[in-house]
Image (cartoon, rainbow, N blue to C red):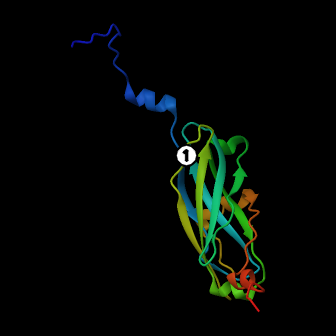
């Protein structure tokens, strides 16, 4: 059986096709202290860019050992920050000494208007009685641009399990 087609043979410029379909955002660099004092605000510094200039938001997912994932937080990007940005998101933490026995991982990605996502970066977080970290020199510019406040309300596994025992 021979099947013929009347369609026209078309040579495509695949670089142009890829560009037209869009490219995902890229998290170029990131920084956050890996240990903070309970009650301290944790700042996560990010640099990201998108060749299409259509970044929409920063998605953050906090994982806590012994508990699992908290709800995903979305920080909307506005104006000029849709093509390239350097800034930070912050997470307020409770003054709970029991946090010193918990370990967390923050997963972060940037999404664009077409639903494309950057690679996910993972940042560890532990609590201890440490002095506040100095902002590294290369992040001073990002320290001037707050992207948003995360609404995730963390608590220690100890606090979560209080009162859940049988008796």
Q: Percent position (x, y) of residue 149?
A: 76, 61
Tell me what residue is drawn at x 58 percent, y 51 percent: 48
Instruction: Tell which residue pokes out farthest to the bottom in this image.
Output: 167
As helix, strand or loop, the secondary structure at mark 1 comes to: loop
> What is the x, y in percent for residue 51?
54, 39
- For this view, does 97 lie left or right of residue 34? right
Q: Residue furthest top?
A: 6
Picture coordinates of residue 80 (x, y %)? 69, 42
User: Taking 65 as reference, is 76 above or below it?
Assistant: above
- Quadrant location of the C terminus? bottom right
Residue tagged 1? 25
Q: Quadrant of the N terminus?
A: top left
Give residue 9's position: percent from left, percent from top: 32, 13
Q: Is residue 6 visible?
A: yes
Q: From the viewer's perspective, is residue 126 above or below residue 92?
A: below
Front residue of this view, candidates 82 and 156: 156
Task: From the viewer's side, name the closer residue of 51 and 156.
Answer: 156
Outermost residue, front direction? 167
Q: Quadrant of residue 39?
A: bottom right
| Other residues around mark 1 within 10 Å, as few (<14) / some (14–19) / many (≥20) | many
Q: Is residue 131 visible?
A: no
Horizontally, residue 114 falls left or right of residue 1, namely: right
**Front position in the image: 88 or 105:** 105
Look at the picture and state if 24 lies above or below 153.
above
Residue toward you, 91 or 147: 91
The number of callouts visible is 1
């Amino acid at each position: 059986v021979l099947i013929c087609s009347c369609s026209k043979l078309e040579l495509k410029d695949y670089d142009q096709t890829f560009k037209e379909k869009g490219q995902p955002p890229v998290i170029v660099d990131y920084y956050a202290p890996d240990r903070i004092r309970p009650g301290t605000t944790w700042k996560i510094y990010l640099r990201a860019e998108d060749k299409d200039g259509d970044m929409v938001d920063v998605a953050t997912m906090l994982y806590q050992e012994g508990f699992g994932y908290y709800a995903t937080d979305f920080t909307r990007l506005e104006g000029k920050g849709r093509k390239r940005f350097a800034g930070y998101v912050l997470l307020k933490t409770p003054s709970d000494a029991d946090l010193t026995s918990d370990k967390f991982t923050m997963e972060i990605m940037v999404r664009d208007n077409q639903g494309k996502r950057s690679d996910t970066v993972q940042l560890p977080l532990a609590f201890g009685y440490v002095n506040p970290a100095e902002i590294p020199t290369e992040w001073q510019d990002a320290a001037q641009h707050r992207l948003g406040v995360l609404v995730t309300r963390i608590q220690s596994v100890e606090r979560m399990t209080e009162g859940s025992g049988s008796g």
